[in-house]
Amino acid sequence: MLKGIPGLGALGDMAGMMKKAQEMQTRMAEMQEQLANTVVMGESGAGLVKARVTAKGEVTGLDIDPSILVASEKEVVEDLILAAIKDAQVKGQQRMSDEMRKMTESLGLPADMKLPF
């Protein structure tokens, strides 16, 4: 027998599912906005280069220690910049994954469920 509102059969379950879907959509939009404003730091070269990146992966700033700005070390500096950015992006992705897991669990969904982003 299908559960739901008496007399409506499966329609009661459908209404509940629609409500859950709308709630999830609202929460995802809020989370997306929050992640766009969440900044994580990545670094390389023992902190000589630091990158600021939003949890969505957008690079918002760099901090480079002037002591490494030597013309003969150009390639090393470039590598350190890329490493700092990648470090920050990995941290941002982890933050996003953590927030998605929290949201799916709070909605009663499996924690490892892949949502559309």
Image (cartoon, grey):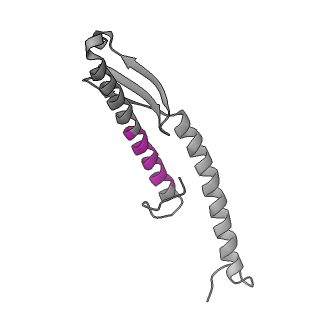
Q: Which residue is drawn at 26% across and 16% down?
A: 73
In the rendered image, residue 93, in percent from the top left (x then y), is placed at 42, 43
Q: Who's the residue at 61% across and 89% down the image? A: 1
**Is 87 placed above or below 68 here?**
below
From the image, give the main secondary structure of the stretch colored magenta. Answer: helix
Q: Is residue 59 left or right of residue 70?
A: right
At 47% from the left and 37% from the top, the residue drawn is 57
* Residue sitting nearer the eye, 62 or 69: 69
Q: Position of residue 87 (x, y in %)?
A: 34, 35
Is 46 on the left or on the right of 10, as rendered?
left
Q: Can you say whether 74 is above or below 105 in the image? A: above
Q: Please, is residue 15 above or below residue 65 in the view?
A: below
Residue 102 % position (x, y): 46, 52
| Residue 117 located within the stretch drawn in magenta | no
The single residue placed furthest to the bottom in the displayed view is 1
Q: Position of residue 8 (x, y in %)?
A: 74, 82
For this view, does 50 lie left or right of residue 58?
Answer: left
* Residue 103 or residue 113, whichever sits in front: 113
The count of marks equals 0
Tell me where residue 90 sits by quadrant.
top left
Instruction: Give the magenta-colored segment's residue range.
Output: 90-103
Task: Please identify the quarter of the rendering in which residue 24 is found.
Answer: bottom right
